[in-house]
Image (cartoon, rainbow, N blue to C red):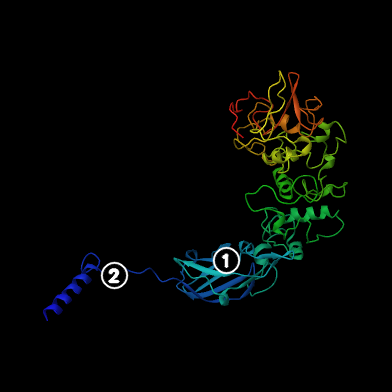
Amino acid sequence: MRRIVITCLTLVAAALLMLPAGASAAPKKKGAPAPSISRVKPMRISVGQVLTITGHRFKAKRSKNTVIFRNGSGRTAFVKPIRASKTKLVLRLPASVARLLKVASSGQQPTRLKLRVLSGTFSRFTSRRLSPVVTAAGDGDGGGGGGNVAVCDNDSDHDNDLLSNSLELQIGTDPCLADTDNDQMTDGWEFWSAKDLNVKAVPYPGKRPFPNALDPTDGAPAGISYSPYDFDGDGLTTLEEYRAWRYTGSSLDMSHVSVGLESALGYSDGTKFSRASTGPATRNFDLIYGSGDSSVNRDDERDADADGLANWLESIHGPGHAAYWGGYWKVPERAIEPWAKKSYCGAPGVEEQRPGEFTQRPFADVDLADPDVDGDTLLDGQDDQDNDDYTNITEMYEVVADIDGNGNPAWCGKADGWIPTINRSGVDWAINPFNPCVPNRDSRSCPPYIPFS
């Protein structure tokens, strides 16, 4: 009996130790119950139409609710309802939801989107049974709400992308979105570039390999300044030409249509001669070469940001990007080892030269739509990317033209003209705008110590 009493007391003591501080402490209060979705109507709906969500524990004040749409890749869009009660939310699908739709076969495809409601706390994402299929604006699916017209037909070109609302519905782009495929290039610019590439002979083809307002792969995600393709073959990628067009403030000038191969756009990736008749730019290649027709401008020869460097020099494919030089020095006829591995021109009375690729520190790349990439108030042409006391104009143009007139003779065993050089006190020195030791070994940023290779 005694053993039983002792055992019981021990159990009671252990239980007391497990209680929170304060013998009379009340249990913690649980959070407010989460909202839930029980019905979605209609289950197939176009962007611009009205969706009704029925459920429980929503907020009666409209602004206190948010509906989250999510596609299969995890991208989301947030929408505020236009009316709300504790059991019902009514919303109109805005243009932001269109960005979640799949793109295939040159068009936005019907896409099932999951829903979630934030009303103080989050509901669960809907199951497939309660996840509506959303189609592009103007497709006419779903019910009610006046369709797309009530959302973005307040003028002839609601999104100001150079395409009328009626034309956008005809070709499959979204009249609510200036950039339907979200590739950083507006629908109208891609439309007119496609017509330029097709020599203005047929309507917008809507298919690859033309610049396509329904194909995000011909552009690039936000934050990238170039794209994979160059449709008109002028050395500038599609996105670079679009950025040049935007930077120069061009609009749609139909007076240039049918003028040779010119474009209604100031810069077009459908023709390399977008503004050929406007005369030479600040740094026209033909003028530097001293040959050709200097009255005709190709887009690569022009200078969109007016910094003294032609567009091609500043493009992703040109010598204004440090990555260019790795491949430049690998061409067999001018093969040069990296700076740290080998010196050249070690003849008596001539200092050694190391013009190869330099990797000891990073350099800023120039940009055809930014006249001052480092923000030091100097235009990039007059600036000096590698701080060797020779301007970018001197070093970058010497790659494509003998601007100092020394003829670029045979250099250190390399064939005549293969190595870009400038004359310094009667001696030809190789140049490289991303190597601070050439052409001046005594520059303020050339390292005095060469690392072991």
Looking at the picture, which amino acid does disc 1 mark? Arg
Given contact means CB atoms under 8 Å apart, are the residues at marks 1 and 2 in contact? no
Left or right: residue 412 compared with residue 15? right
- Write down the residue under mark 1: 70
Marked residue nearer the N-terminal end (1 or 2): 2
Image position of 131 with respect to 318: above or below: below
Quarter of the image that includes the C terminus: top right
- Write down the residue under mark 2: 27
Label 1 vs label 2: CA separation?
A: 37 Å
Left or right: residue 121 compared with residue 130? left
Q: Residue furthest left?
A: 2
Q: Position of residue 227 (x, y in %)?
A: 70, 50
Image position of 447 with respect to 46: above or below: above
Looking at the picture, which amino acid does disc 2 mark? Pro
Seen from the viewer's position, the closer of residues 340 and 127 is 340
Residue at 57% across, 66% down: 70
Q: Secondary structure at mark 2?
A: loop
Image position of 22 with respect to 252: above or below: below
Quarter of the image that includes the N terminus: bottom left
Q: Quadrant of residue 415?
A: top right
Left or right: residue 181 compared with residue 275? left
How packed mark 1 is, by other alpha carbons closer than 10 Å (few <14, some 14-19, many 20 or more), is many
Q: Secondary structure at mark 1?
A: strand
